[in-house]
Image (spheres, helix red, strand yellow):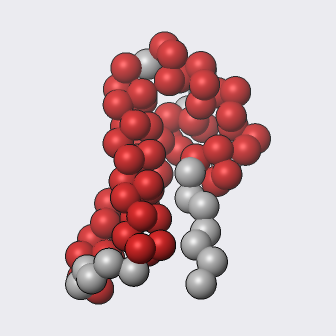
Amino acid sequence: MQIEHHDLHHEFPELSAKMHSLKLNDTHFAKLFTEYDHLDHEIRRLENAGLLISDAEMERLKLNRIHLKDKLYGYLVKPS
């Protein structure tokens, strides 16, 4: 099974420059970005390793990732 990449640079390649700028200049964005990145890596690790995790727990992790992505996207499209 091929695992999709959900890192933000794959999700929003057209916003890479703004992502970089916000990571450097906005501590809250940088914190959320790091949290998203760690969560995405954890989900992929669990999926790749085939570790036993309940469907409910995996769903919770993925919903948290979506919630963080929505917050981060809000920062990225907010007019400067």
Q: Residue at x 50, y 23 (%)?
A: 23
Rendered view: 64 above or below 77: below
Which residue: 44% across, 55% down? 41
Pinpoint residue 1: horizontal percent, then vertical percent.
59, 84
Q: Quadrant of residue 28?
A: top left
Can you give x and y, in whole percent of width and height, for residue 17 in the image?
A: 70, 27
**Rendered residue at 73%/44% (across/down):** 13
Toward the top, the furthest residue is: 25
Residue at the right extreme, as displayed:
14
| Residue 19 appears in the figure | yes
Left or right of 25, for residue 64 = left
Question: Which quadrant of the figure contains the C terminus?
Answer: top right
Q: Is residue 65 visible?
A: no
56 relative to 32 in the view: left or right: left
Q: Is residue 53 above or below residue 14?
A: below
Question: Foreground: 31 or 67?
Answer: 31
Q: Quadrant of residue 2?
A: bottom right
